[in-house]
Image (spheres, helix red, strand yellow):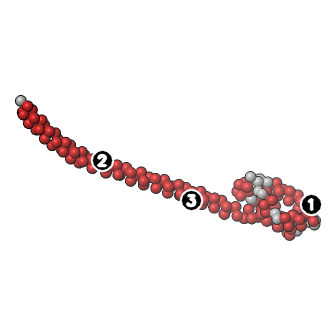
Amino acid sequence: MPFALDEYLNEESILILEDTPPTIPDFIKAQLHRLMDHLELDTSILIQGAGPIREFFNQIKDDLPSSLKEIIQPAAFLEGNGPKFLNAQSRLAAREAQKSSAAAEGQCIEEIQSVKKTNDLLKESPAEINKDLAALNEERTQLLAQLKTIEDTIK
């Protein structure tokens, strides 16, 4: 994505340039055209290597009319703040990674708690099953005794 110069130009600056075009020597025009070629590059390329833009600007800045300096300032801003932009970008990526790891940690904790509950239930289950089995065996013994009594009565 090329640098959007239009976003940094206000209508007043454009009108001033259209009404009273500044007199610019040919060597500065040539440098400005070279500068424009660099500004049309992808923004990520500009941020990583804005040295040529700075060199162009430094060569001609003293010879530029103030109205043109205002227009070129976005390039200087970009060049000067490129490292800050890259640092901010990596901090944002780190925050996103931290958020996703915190979410993953929360999910892991929930899964561990669920497994612990299941494990606790399984630990308690044999005792419950043994109690139920003992009660059923006792009931079976009683029913068999009642059945024997009924059989004896019928005979």
Q: Secondary structure at mark 2?
A: helix
* Label 2 – label 3 distance at C-alpha: 40 Å
Q: Nearer the viewer, residue 33 or 22?
A: 22
**Above or below 123: residue 65:** below
Q: What label does residue 95 carry, if any? A: 3
Q: Which mark is residue 26?
A: 1
| Marks 2, 1: nearer the viewer | 2
CA separation in Å, label 1 and label 3: 50 Å
Depth order, front residue of 24/52: 24
Q: Give the SS element for disc 1.
A: helix
Q: Residue at x 42, y 54 (%)?
A: 109
On-image quarter of the C terminus: top left
Residue 47 location, x and y as percent? Answer: 71, 58
Amino acid at pointer 3? Arg
Residue 89 location, quadrant: bottom right
For discs 2 and 3, the disc positioned in front in the rendered view:
2
Q: Name the residue tied to disc 2.
A: 122
